[in-house]
Structure formats: C-alpha cells, structure tokens
Amino acid sequence: MALLAVACAGRPPVSAGGPPSVVTAPTTSTSGPDLPGVHLPAGSEPVAGSRVDARALPAGYPRLVWTEGNGSVIGFFAEQGACTTVSASVVAQTGDAVTVRLLLQQPASTKPCPQYLLNKEMTVNLDRPLGSRTVIMQAAIERG
C-alpha cells in the first residue's frame, strides 16, 4: 500500500443523513495520475481503458482496473484513510457491463482527522468472466 498525503478540503462534500450520494467527476485516463503503489499486480490482466468507465470516481482517484484468474475477478485500487473506510460490491451485471460500487464511509464526528490516504488493492467476484463487458466504477459517500 502507498501512503499519500492529501487535504480533506479537496474531497467531495458529504451530506448528513439520507442515502449515500454518487459523486461524479470527469476522468481523462483509465489509470489516473501516477500514484505511488498503484500498479498492476503480478499475474493479472489489465482491462483496456476503453472498457472502463470511471467518470463517477472522485478526481485524482486511482483508475487502474484488471482481471485475475479466468477473468471472473475484477481488481482495482480504492482510497482508505484514518477517517474513511472503503468497501466494494458488484451492484449490476448485464451482458454489456459490470457495475462496481465503492462505498466510502466517513465518521459522523467533526473531529480533526489525520490527513492521509492509502491506496488499498481490492477485488470483487463476478458471476462469470468479464469478457468484453465494460466495467463501470461508481463511488458513494456515507457519513455516520
């Protein structure tokens, strides 16, 4: 895992209460900026940038996506820090696309938080190999 220093002020706003909101931000690259520790794991196969829709991830978020094994496991990096935990799940699988949602959970308290993020390697299992399907990455932020 890589240790990155960031300012919380640069993170998207979080609303108190109600369902998590999906954060959208433009993306210009599948792999995103060069981030320490964000690399393709040994034995994995990269998913082509044309088959990854990561526009809904926060700006600066890692956008590298790969498959493992027979293609029925998707891997990616997600940011986790002192005050933010992250989990991931597959929320939809069709013949054309797989949608992966990252849930970024932040505490309800307004106490100061150490300002660091780790790029955490994560995987999710598919019901069948990815094949030529597109991977749609989403992010939801939940407070409390």
Image: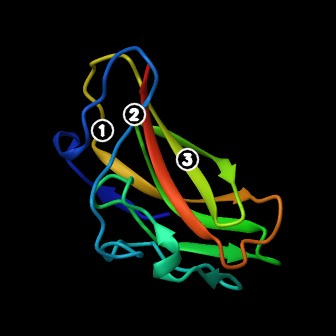
The answer to whether the residue labelled 1 contacts the one labelled 2, judged by CB atoms less than 8 Å apart, is yes
Residue 22 locus on image (x, y percent): 40, 39
Distance in Å between CA atoms under marks 3 and 1: 25 Å
Secondary structure at numbered mark 1:
loop
Give the total number of marks visible in the rendering: 3
**2 or 3: tag closer to the N-terminus:** 2
Residue 35 locus on image (x, y percent): 35, 72
User: Residue at left 42%, top 16%?
Assistant: 18
Disc 2 residue type?
Answer: Cys
Visible residue check, residue 120: no
User: Residue at left 65%, top 72%?
Assistant: 133
Disc 3 residue type?
Answer: Arg
Mark 2 neighbour density, 10 Å: few (under 14) some (14–19) many (20 or more): some
Q: Label for residue 101?
A: 3
Secondary structure at numbered mark 2:
loop
Q: Label for residue 10?
A: none
Mark 3 neighbour density, 10 Å: few (under 14) some (14–19) many (20 or more): many
**26 to 44, vertically: above or below:** above
- Give the mark toward the camera: 3 or 1: 3
Residue underneath mark 2: 83
- Give the mark toward the camera: 1 or 2: 2
**50 to 97, vertically: above or below:** below
Residue furthest to the left: 9
Is residue 37 or residue 87 the one in the foreground? 87
**126 to 141, vertically: above or below:** below
Secondary structure at numbered mark 3:
strand
Q: Indicate left or right for 63 with 28 as reference.
A: right
Mark 1 neighbour density, 10 Å: few (under 14) some (14–19) many (20 or more): few
Residue underneath mark 1: 114
